[in-house]
Image (tube, grey):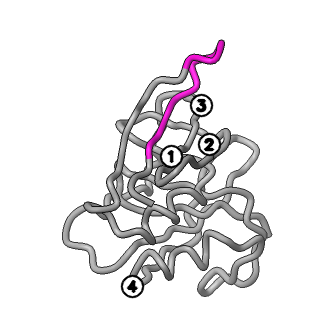
Amino acid sequence: MKKLVYYIDRGNENYERFYEYAASNVDSDELYARQLCTYLIKDETEYQLLYNEMAADEEFLILQELRPNKRNIDEKSYLYGFNGIPIEFRTIDSLNQHTLLTATSVRDHWSAIRYLLKDYVQVPDHGLYEVTSTELDEDRGCYVIYVNE
């Protein structure tokens, strides 16, 4: 893989090139981890993954723009001075509140992929939960795994 390219589906077969990551600048494990996330938060906007595809040495993620991202009070940034790859575990209630259960970190994206691939995860200090979706929050520098008991 030489690069990962995000596109936004604007409808009527109109795809807007959004963002690109070259494999020469980003670890290949991170490029694969990104492809496992069903949501992306970037530049204060929430996107949902519609599908991904590949052609030759390029990977494409096709997104749907959903809405401006609404921050929760308990969300913190991991962009500066954080060691490892942060992963938050959150639940979503009927009022669409994203409640933080706990956060952990892993040493690299390969280790993050292990969590992102699962249908059920052992949430540290909480037990076994079903994964409902996964998110890469670029604005805060973390992965978020949404779960149900």
Report x, y in % for residue 1. 45, 60
In the image, residue 97 above or below residue 145 = above
Tell me which amino acid carries mark 4.
Arg
Check if mark 1's residue and mark 2's residue have beta carbons within 8 Å: yes
> Which region shows up in magenta?
5-14
Q: Residues within 10 Å of mark 4 (few under 14, many from 20)?
A: few
Tell me which amino acid carries mark 1.
Leu
The residues tagged by marks 3 and 4 sit, at their Cα atoms, a distance apart of 31 Å
Report x, y in % for residue 88. 51, 67
* Residue at which label 3 appears: 64
Check if mark 1's residue and mark 4's residue have beta carbons within 8 Å: no
First along the sequence among labels 2 and 3:
2
First along the sequence among labels 1 and 4:
1
In the image, residue 92 above or below residue 65 = below
Check if mark 2's residue and mark 4's residue have beta carbons within 8 Å: no
* Residue at disc 4, secondary structure: loop
* Residue at disc 1, secondary structure: strand
The residues tagged by marks 1 and 2 sit, at their Cα atoms, a distance apart of 8 Å
The residues tagged by marks 2 and 4 sit, at their Cα atoms, a distance apart of 26 Å
Residue 122 colored magenta? no
* Residue at which label 2 appears: 49
The residues tagged by marks 2 and 3 sit, at their Cα atoms, a distance apart of 6 Å
Report x, y in % for residue 87. 48, 70
First along the sequence among labels 1 and 3:
1
* Residue at which label 1 appears: 40
Tell me which amino acid carries mark 2.
Leu
